Amino acid sequence: MASTYIPQHFSIEELLPPPVFLPDAFRRAGYESLFRLFDFRVLVTLDLLRKRYGPCTVNNWHFYDSSAWGDLSVHMFRFSGWRPFDCEEGADLSEHKLFRAMDCKFRQVTPNEIWDDMIAKTSAPEFEFMQRIEAFSGMTWFHFDMGQHGRYGKAIKVLSGKTNRAGLPAFIERVA
Ligand SMILES: [Zn+2]
């Protein structure tokens, strides 16, 4: 376990769905041992974002009654961290399914404010490992991931929502 990065500010429940959505192998291993499944850069980045921007929710299902965990008609955040392959939320091969993406809901800042910071200081430690973000008008969460793209390491790729990139360029250049 010594080689596994354990986030200071996030429990493992916050990054995984409720037990009913976990593969058997995950359940057998136990939640606490599963931090190692995540790309460590995602975990480091989560902590850095939390330190800079304050309280942040990824999943919150563990604060609800367990009888509602499997009931998708009850709204709660279950799939904002890792997502199972048969999850109908998001893209088929979403980076969420590859342990490389997070949807962060910050209490004190909006995604717009973070995007502005990112453009002003793309090489700040909070953004250093990020490779792609999603942006569209009215977006209420901050999605980042470590997915590959043609300008890996040189820029952060901005994925559009269905309609737009909220005025952001296709790539945010990494200038120190
Ligand atoms: Zn996402």
Image: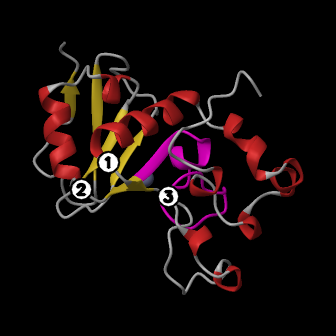
Look at 75% across and 60% down and name the residue there: 22
User: Looking at the image, can residue 145 be seen?
Assistant: yes
Looking at the rendered image, the quarter that the C terminus falls into is top left
Please tell me the numbered disc located at residue 80. 3
| Image position, residue 133 (x, y; %) | 32, 41
Residue placed most toward the observer, 30 or 168: 30
Vertical position of residue 59 compared to residue 168: above or below: below
The residue indicated by pointer 1 is 54
The alpha-carbon separation of the residues under discs 3 and 2 comes to 19 Å
The residue indicated by pointer 2 is 108
Look at 42% across and 53% down and name the residue there: 103
The alpha-carbon separation of the residues under discs 2 and 1 comes to 7 Å
The crowd level at tag 1 (other Cα within 10 Å; few <14, some 14-19, many 20+) is few
Q: Residue furthest right?
A: 28
Q: Is residue 105 left or right of residue 75?
A: left
Which stretch did the figure color magenta? 81-103
Look at 26% across and 22% down and name the residue there: 124
Q: Mark 1 or 3 closer to N-term?
A: 1
Q: Secondary structure at mark 2?
A: loop
Please tell me the numbered disc located at residue 126. none
Residue type at tag 1:
Gly
Q: Magenta segment: does it hold 125? A: no
Vertical position of residue 44 compared to residue 71: above or below: above
Residue type at tag 3:
Ser
Q: Is residue 77 left or right of residue 54?
A: right
- In the image, is the residue at mark 2 within 8 Å of ligand 1 by its beta carbon? no
Residue 149 found in image quarter: top left
How has the structure been colored for display? Answer: secondary structure
Looking at the rendered image, the quarter that the N terminus falls into is top right
Q: Mark 3 or 2 closer to N-term?
A: 3
Residue type at tag 2:
Gln
Residue placed most toward the observer, 118 or 95: 118
